[in-house]
Amino acid sequence: IRRCSYFPKDVTVFDTDNKSEPIRVLVTGAAGQIAYSLLYSIGNGSVFGKDQPIILVLLDITPMMGVLDGVLMELQDCALPLLKDVIATDKEEVAFKDLDVAILVGSMPRREGMERKDLLKANVKIFKSQGAALDKYAKKSVKVIVVGNPANTNCLTASKSAPSIPKENFSCLTRLDHNRAKAQIALKLGVTANDVKNVIIWGNHSSTQYPDVNHAKVKLQGKEVGVYEALKDDSWLKGEFVTTVQQRGAAVIKARKLSSAMSAAKAICDHVRDIWFGTPEGEFVSMGVISDGNSYGVPDDLLYSFPVVIKNKTWKFVEGLPINDFSREKMDLTAKELTEEKETAFEFLSSA
């Protein structure tokens, strides 16, 4: 087994005064650009807290191991007191061992001329293998966050391949879409994103996602008002706002010639921090979770983005939000896409 840790097992490289046990956190696709924006935030305590030591495990494919060595050197050079060890590997049995948290960023990207079906097939193979590795090597209490696209279906594939880990422990990232929606409302109203809360992303992390601000609130002159009431511009909220959020990823690629990395890493940090510490009182967030038992008419056994609150590292659906006809149609459309994706993926899953 190639263990690229430059921190010898029996040497404490960074001595910290804190006495809590280190947690093992895996990031896959660790040589990629999202991970490059993410790893420092994990290592400096802004995700798991300033007194939580971390053993950081970095997984990537064999051809990327040279690049990963460079990332590892940089993490050493950050001299982060909370990093007890950094392990870089291309072996699943090393990467998935005894994990507390797995952040699955790596996936097969869509190449030019590639059908979505081909993309699903390639990713089923990856996430079936990683799910099986979680099942075999990780702690049963592991929290698994899937970022690699198509994130919802990849997350469902991993969960199905890890039957001994509760399916509630699996979630996928729609927090980037959630943050994009918050930011668009804040920009339109001339407030900060912090003044906007309770936007919702329903459904798939794709262009069918539905950013919903029917239940969102904004702080204006010290008091909270509904976003619809504050903006008084229903046609923008039902039109340009929705499409801007849905297509923001493509707009970033067009401008930057690279996909969102800094904002994706920030969203991952938000998502994982909320799992770890819970959501603030009176606020909910969006994440892709198993749809079983929801009260919004979304079919069971889909990995669908819902509004959730989190307490004691456990999420719950936000219940009882009224859904109007406009929302219903959008929610059903994205559920339909997810059902089709799931069916395609499961054909491959049985043969993979």
Image: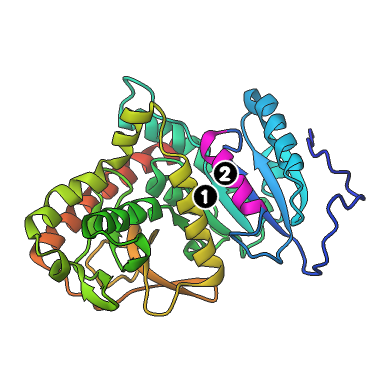
Query: Residue, x 46% and y 41% (percent of image)?
Result: 148
Looking at the image, is mark 1 or mark 2 earlier in the sequence?
Answer: 2
Q: Is residue 256 magenta?
A: no
Report the amino acid beneath label 1: Ser
Instruction: Tell me if label 1 and label 2 are in contact, CB under 8 Å.
Output: yes
In the image, residue 218 lies at what x, y percent?
Answer: 26, 70
Q: Is residue 42 magenta?
A: yes
Say what secondary structure mark 1 lies in: loop
Query: Residue, x 30% and y 50% (percent of image)?
Result: 204
Report the amino acid beneath label 2: Gln
Closest to the observer, 106 or 40: 40
Query: Residue, x 82% and y 61% (percent of image)?
Result: 16
In 3D space, how far apart are the residues under numbered discs 1 and 2 (Cα atoms)?
8 Å
Side of 45 where 14 appears, left or right: right
The residues colored magenta run: 32-43
Mark 1 or 2, which is nearer the eye?
Answer: 2
Q: Quadrant of residue 291?
A: bottom left
